[in-house]
Image (cartoon, rainbow, N blue to C red):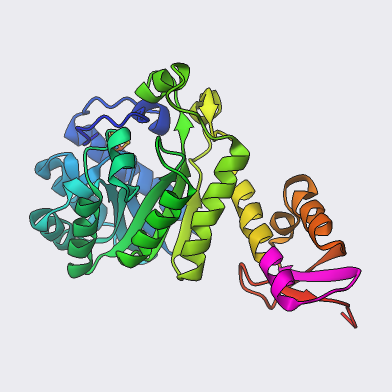
Amino acid sequence: MGCRNACVFCSQRAITGVDCAEPDLESELRRIRATVEQAIPTLGGSDAEIAFFGGSFTGIGEERMIAFLRCAREYLGGNIKGIRCSTRPDYIDGRICGILKENGVTSVELGIQSTDDAVLAASKRGHTAAQSEKACELLARYGFELGGQMMVGMPLANEQSEIKTARDIVAFGASTCRIYPMVVFKDTPLYEMTLAGEYTPLTNEEAARRAAACARVFIDSGVEILRIGLHSSGNLSEAPFGANHPALGELAEGEIYYGIIREKIASSGARASSLTAVVPYGELSKCIGHKGINRERLEAEFGAKINFVRYKGLNKYDVRILSEITSY
Ligand code: SF4
C-alpha cells in the first residue's frame, strides 16, 4: 500500500506476500491491534518497536496514516519504545515529518537504494539522489533516527557505485542501514529485462561479496547493519533469478569476516606456518565461512594453517591474529 511508483524490480505481492488492494480502515486497525497484542507476551522483557514496513508508509494517505499511528501509539511505554516506518525519499516533506513526530514515530527508514542518478533512472525509481539527501536532512532536523536502505545489483550499478552509495548514506547521517541484494521476481519488468538479456542477475556469491563491500563502509563508520538480504519466505525461494539464497545475510557476513581477517593477517606481518584468528564468540561459523571457504582461501593466500579460536571478550567484527598460541 501507499506506493504510486513502479520500480522495475518491484513485486509488492511477491515481497510482502499480501495483495496491495486497500483494505477497510477498521479491519486494518483490528489487524494492527491483534498483531501487537499477540507479540507483546513473546517479548520476554526485551525492548521492541512497532514498525510499518513493506511499502511506502507515508504515501498511504494522511487519514489512514494518522489512524494507524494513533493505534500504535496506544501501546507505547513498557517494552515498546517507539514506532518505526519505511518510506520513499520523495514521500517525505515538512508536513509529513510533523505528522510522524506528533504521532510518536521515532525512526524512519528511507529506501535510498542508490545515490547514482543513472542507476535510479534505470530502475525507474522515480526519485533522485538529491531528493534522498534532502529527505535525510529533513528527518535529521525533526530528530528522527534515520535508517538508510540500499540495494546491490541494480541495473547499471557496479561495486564502485554501491560503495559510494554506502558512503553517501553514512554522510546523510544514517545510524542504521539495510542492504538488499537484487532478486528478480516473476511478473516484474526486471524479469522481462533479464529474459531479454538487458540485465544480468547477480549470483548469490557476487551478491554476498558486493553486500559485504558496502557493509564494511557501514561497520567502519559505526552504522548499525539491521539486515542483509530479503526476509526468507516462500516467495523468495520462488524467485527465478538473482540473490535468492535464503541465508544470503550469512553468506555476506562470511565475506565481511573474510575481508577483516585477511586485512588483519596482512597488517600483523605474522609470517608463521600456523596462525590463529581469535574471533568473537558466536561468530565462528561466519569466520570460517560457508563450507570452510574462508579458511581455504586464507590458507592458500598466506601459505599458513589458520586456526580459529572463539573468545568472549571480542565484539562483533573484532578479530585478533596470533602467530602462536601460548595458553588458553
Ligand atoms: S518504491 Fe518500493 S513499493 Fe514502490 S514500486 Fe518501488 S519497490 Fe515497490
Residue at point 24%, 44% (across, down): 57
The residue stretch that appears in magenta? 261-280
On the image, the x and y values in percent for residue 235 come to 49, 27
Q: Is residue 18 above or below residue 63?
A: above
Residue at point 18%, 52% (across, down): 70
On the image, the x and y values in percent for residue 299 come to 83, 58
Side (left or right) of 172 relative to 179: left
**Number of residue marks:** 0
Q: Nearer the viewer, residue 312 or 32?
A: 312
Query: Is residue 35 magenta-colored?
Result: no
Q: Residue furthest left?
A: 95
Q: Is residue 19 above or below residue 233?
A: above
Q: Is residue 125 visible?
A: yes
Q: Residue furthest bottom?
A: 326
On the image, the x and y values in percent for residue 278 come to 76, 72
Q: Is residue 28 above or below residue 318?
A: above
Quadrant of residue 191 within the rendered picture: top left
Residue at point 11%, 60% (across, down): 98
Q: Nearer the viewer, residue 222 or 123?
A: 123
Quadrant of residue 142 within the rendered picture: bottom left
Q: Quadrant of the C terminus?
A: bottom right
Q: Nearer the viewer, residue 78 or 18?
A: 18
Q: Ligand 1 appears in which quadrant?
A: top left
Quadrant of residue 75 within the rendered picture: bottom left
Side (left or right) of 44 relative to 303: left
Q: Is residue 249 visible?
A: no
Q: Is residue 85 above or below residue 243?
A: below
Residue at point 24%, 33% (across, down): 27
On the image, the x and y values in percent for residue 168 come to 34, 60
Q: Quadrant of the N terminus?
A: top left
